[in-house]
Image: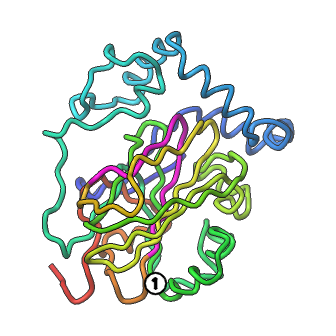
């Protein structure tokens, strides 16, 4: 059972996890763990499932998925019957009239719909995966010089579950450098898996880049694939100016993670998110929603 904090209702809720029984069997049984390491974590498994999700026959999965997970389709451009395949549905776009982005440049917005954890004054060599498990930033991005720049800064971990909107966006006006690609496995990023596999973010396929933000200095963006994520698609054009809220990219099927790193003394994360992280709970957020503020600009 995964519980998270809903900051709008100020209540704790239980996440309806897609494939929960399967995940528990994989990560908590000997046979499941054997299959995980032999086949499921490997690229071929995600490729096979991705091919199926690109076929028209996969469209039949959409209706049950929407009903089971109570997805509000009024937020999106198309209705469920208008998508050609499950992958089309999975990477669905928001209806522009439903997008609500904080306009104040000093306010830090969420880049995506997700459950977020926030860590301030980070040790770049001991980033928290879960209680008792850590990983290093230099191992995550395979670049020690850049990792050093974020010592004492802030780390925000956005977990996108399979039921979420799976596009991610820029948090500010600025210019984004080219994306760096790191090969890896395809472990789940669900908390069930995070508790079982050490340094899971450093094991999975991932991409990273530096975003030269107008208001928040140089932000390190990291996108991490997961089980059955066929691809991480970057839709922005490197080294061209982008605006606050512009799309950066999207994930194909599967739960995924976006991690943002900020330099020291740049941002202050909202108190409720910090408090819930300290208690061990993720906080649900939506793309464009306020999650913090630029230092020395309290509001």
Q: Quadrant of residue 141?
A: bottom right
Tell me the SS state at disc 1. loop
Magenta stretch holds residue 247: yes
* Crowd class of label 1 (few under 14; some 14 to 19; many from 20; radius 10 Å): some
* Residue that badge 1 annotates: 153
> Considering only vertical position in the picture, is 213 above or below 79?
below
Q: Is residue 236 magenta?
A: no
Q: Nearer the viewer, residue 117 or 60?
A: 60
Q: Residue at x 41, y 42 (%)?
A: 166
Residue 150 as seen in the image, left or right of residue 13 = right
The boundaries of the magenta stretch are 246-261
165 vs 177: above or below: above
Residue 263 showing in the rendered view? yes
Q: Which residue lies at the image location 57% right of the left edge and 54% below the top edge?
A: 224
Q: Residue at x 33, y 31 (%)?
A: 71
Quarter location, residue 29 = top right
Q: How is the image coloured?
A: rainbow
Total number of numbered discs in the rendering:
1
Left or right of residue 70: residue 28: right
């Amino acid at each position: 059972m995964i519980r998270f904090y809903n900051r709008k209702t100020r209540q704790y809720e239980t996440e309806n996890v897609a494939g929960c029984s399967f995940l528990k069997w994989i990560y908590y049984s000997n046979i499941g763990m054997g299959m995980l390491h032999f086949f499921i974590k490997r690229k071929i498994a995600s490729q096979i499932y991705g091919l199926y999700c690109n076929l028209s026959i996969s469209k039949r999965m959409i209706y049950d998925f929407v009903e089971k997970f109570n997805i509000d389709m009024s937020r999106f451009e198309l209705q469920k019957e208008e998508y050609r395949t499950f992958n089309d549905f999975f990477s669905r776009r928001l209806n522009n009239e439903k997008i609500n982005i904080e306009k104040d440049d000093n306010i830090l917005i969420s880049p995506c719909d997700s459950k977020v954890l926030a860590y301030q004054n980070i040790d770049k060599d001991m980033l928290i995966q879960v209680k008792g498990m850590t990983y290093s930033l230099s191992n995550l991005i395979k670049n020690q010089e850049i990792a050093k720049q974020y010592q004492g800064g802030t780390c925000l971990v956005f977990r996108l579950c399979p039921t979420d909107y799976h596009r991610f966006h820029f948090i500010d006006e600025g210019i984004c450098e080219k994306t760096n690609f790191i090969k890896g496995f395809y472990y789940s990023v669900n908390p069930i898996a995070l508790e079982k596999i050490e340094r899971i973010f450093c094991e999975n396929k991932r991409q990273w880049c530096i975003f030269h933000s107008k208001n928040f200095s140089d932000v390190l963006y990291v996108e991490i694939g997961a089980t059955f994520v066929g691809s991480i698609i970057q839709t922005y054009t490197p080294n061209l100016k982008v605006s606050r809220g512009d799309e950066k990219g999207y994930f194909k099927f599967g739960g995924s993670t976006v991690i943002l790193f900020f330099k020291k003394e740049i941002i202050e994360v909202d108190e409720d998110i910090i408090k819930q992280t300290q208690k061990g709970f993720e906080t649900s957020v939506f793309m464009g929603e306020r999650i913090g503020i630029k230092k020395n600009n309290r509001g």
